[in-house]
Each structure stands twice: as structure tokens, then as C-alpha cells.
Image (cartoon, rainbow, N blue to C red):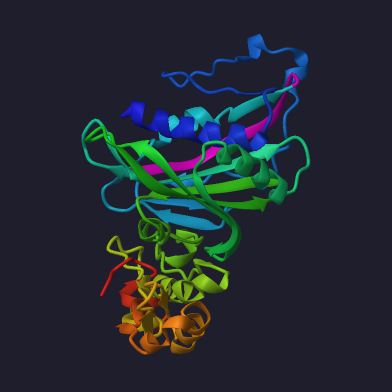
Amino acid sequence: MKKIWLCILAGIFLISFSACGGNDLIVDTPDQNGTSANTSENLSSDETAKPDIPENYALGTFDGKIFRSKWLGLNFQLPNGWTTIGEDDRKKFNDTAIPAYKNGSIEELYYIEIAAWEDDGKDGTKDHNSLVITSTFKSSVETLEGYVEKNKKSIEKTNADIVWDAEYILADQDYILCKSTVSGQNQQNGLTEKYRTWDLWREKDGAYVCIQCSGYEDSDILQNLSYIKKYEDPASTGNSTDTSSSNSTKNSTSSSTSSSTNSSAGGSNNYAQTNNPCANGHNWVAVTEKVHHDEVGHYESVMIKEESQWYKCPVCGETFYSLNSYYSHFDSAHSDTSFLRNDYTHGRIPADYEKKWIVDKKAYDETVTTGYRCSVCGQRK
């Protein structure tokens, strides 16, 4: 199982490193035994400089079922079938934090709040469902937007399908939501599959908080995020974890989705592991597709040359196409044989037609509704 969470943590370090941007930043990742590659004996005196940690900062606690963080202002109920890296391993990492060095100094410190994923009970994970929360403290002052922008540029180099900068509310906190679609290997069948990842960023007391949640579809991620609630201290609530949270995107295209999600979150009691984000009703949106209609018409016979007559001279055999033309010829060329003037032969030349396409209705595209899909859970009807 250690191999599993080390892979997850490696992904955390990669994200953190990319967000810092620059080849001069070195992340001190642990080895298989959880030991740092850079120890205090290997660092110069300048490397003791590190970011300031707020006095009110404290790692969240996890009792095996619920992760609670007063500082983050949230609780996370571990869903059925999920596992975490374990408190001993998390404590080993966070006793000294995960440092990143830049120019001989500790530029950033990463604290792993919690890393959880759906576990199949075998030597592998259903890693399409996972949730990781980290807190990053920096030595230099930087806006949240600038920090996220660096992360964006790094991930864009992977050619992932990315949607950035939507606003999202989770447990009454504002986040910048970054969605991406990436490819990964299914550890069960070895096949490469695409899955969705949401990165939710916000700033807290000078630190950058990131909640990274993955799933095959957005509906999986919404379900996973529904287990995050606004923080409440069990000591003051009689161990009740009934909270009211607002988990939604602020943009207009997702307003109805957030309404449906909020209604189910507000009605949950004791983090019911059967939490259904659509318990109070689905948010149906039309599923449409574009249908092309070809041009409609018919063929008609169109005359391109009218019917005509021909006249042949009885003396020289020359052909003319009007009687007047024939008489003019005969009178000038054969006047000595005037008795043959009306002995011409003549015939009819039929009119000439061709088929022409007549358009009755021009081609056009039409958007039609093929069904309806719940924007929260993905159910169709």
C-alpha cells in the first residue's frame, strides 16, 4: 500500500513544482522509506531560511472517519471504500514539511493535509476517485492568481484539455476552479483511460490551499466533493456533523447545478455515507445535438433552344433556316430557273431541352433535444 500513496504524493510534488515554475526550484521528495533526500547535514547555513508559518496554523486531524481542519474551515468525511495514507506517514512527512529549494534557500513548504482515494482492497487503487488537500507556504509574496497562472502554464505543456479560472464555493469558501482532462493508466487492466481532475485553489493567511479531486466524470467529482462540509468542532456540537455548506460554481452555466447540490448538502445528517447530491431532486438540462437537413428540390425540363424549320434549295442543295433566307438565295443565284422556286424541301428541328435542379428548400442545420441529463449526478432520462 505504501507504493500507492507514494505515487499520489509524487503527483502532489509535481503540481507544486510546476506551480513554482523554474528549473532552479528543487523539491525535496522523500524516498520509499519516507526519508528526505536533502538532510540538514547537506544544507548550507543559508538554506535554513524558510517561509513564515502563521501562528494560528495547525494541521487538521483525522480520526479514521472524518478529517477536520479548523484552519482550513472544513471537514471531510471519508466515503465508504476509501483509504488514506495514514496518520503515521502523514506525520512523518509533515513534521519537517516537504521543502522546495531555490537559490540555496527554502522557497516553499508543502504540508499534506490529507490524501485519500477509493481502494479496491487489492494491490492497486481505483485511482479515478481521489482527493488530496495541501497547504503551501512561500517565502516570496505572490498573488493567488499569479501562483495559479504558473501552474496553468505548466499543465498546458502536457496537452491536457483544460478549463481555468471558474469561481467555485466549497464549504463557504471561495476557490478558483481549474478543470482538466488527462490520461492515466488503469492499475487493474493496464489500459490507458481518460479521467477528470478539478484543482480548487484559494489563499489562506499567506498560504496557497489546493484541493485536488479526480474522477472519470464531473459527476464523480461532485459526488466526492459533497463529502466536504463547513468545519464544526465535534466538542461543541455533540459530535454532530450536520453542517450547511455551499458547493457551487458561480458562473451562470452552473447556477442551477449549484442549487441542486446545495439543497442536498444542507439536508445531510452526520455525513451519511450514502450522501446523494440529488436527494432533493435532479437538475435536468437538455441534451442536444445538431442535425443537418439536406437541400430539397426536384428536376425540371427546361428548353434551351426553341423549335425551328429548315429549307433546302432544289438547285444547289444548300440549307437555310428561314423561308425568307431561302427565297433571297434562290432569286439571286437561280433566277434562270424560276419555275423551281417553290420546289424546296423543308423539315422541322425539334426544340432542345435539358434537366435542371430546382431548389424547393435550402439545406440547414437544426439543434434538436435528444433527452435530458442531470448536471449534478449525470443521470439521464
Q: Answer above or below: position of 293 versus 72.
A: below
Question: Image quadrant for the N terminus?
Answer: top left
Per the rendered image, the range of residues in magenta is 103-117
Q: Main secondary structure of the magenta part?
A: strand
Q: Residue at x 55, y 15 (%)?
A: 37
The one of 145 and 272 positioned closer to us in this rendering: 145
Residue 297 visible to the viewer: yes
Q: Answer above or below: position of 79 versus 31.
A: below
Asked where in the image residue 39 lies, by quadrant, the reply is top right
Residue that protrudes farthest toward the top in the picture: 41
Q: Residue at x 57, y 36 (%)?
A: 157
Residue that protrudes farthest toward the front in the picture: 336
Residue 72 horizontal/vertical position (percent): 57, 53
Asked where in the image residue 188 lies, by quadrant, the reply is top left
Q: Is residue 98 left or right of residue 32?
A: right
Residue 104 colored in magenta in the image? yes
Q: Answer above or below: position of 55 versus 229.
A: above
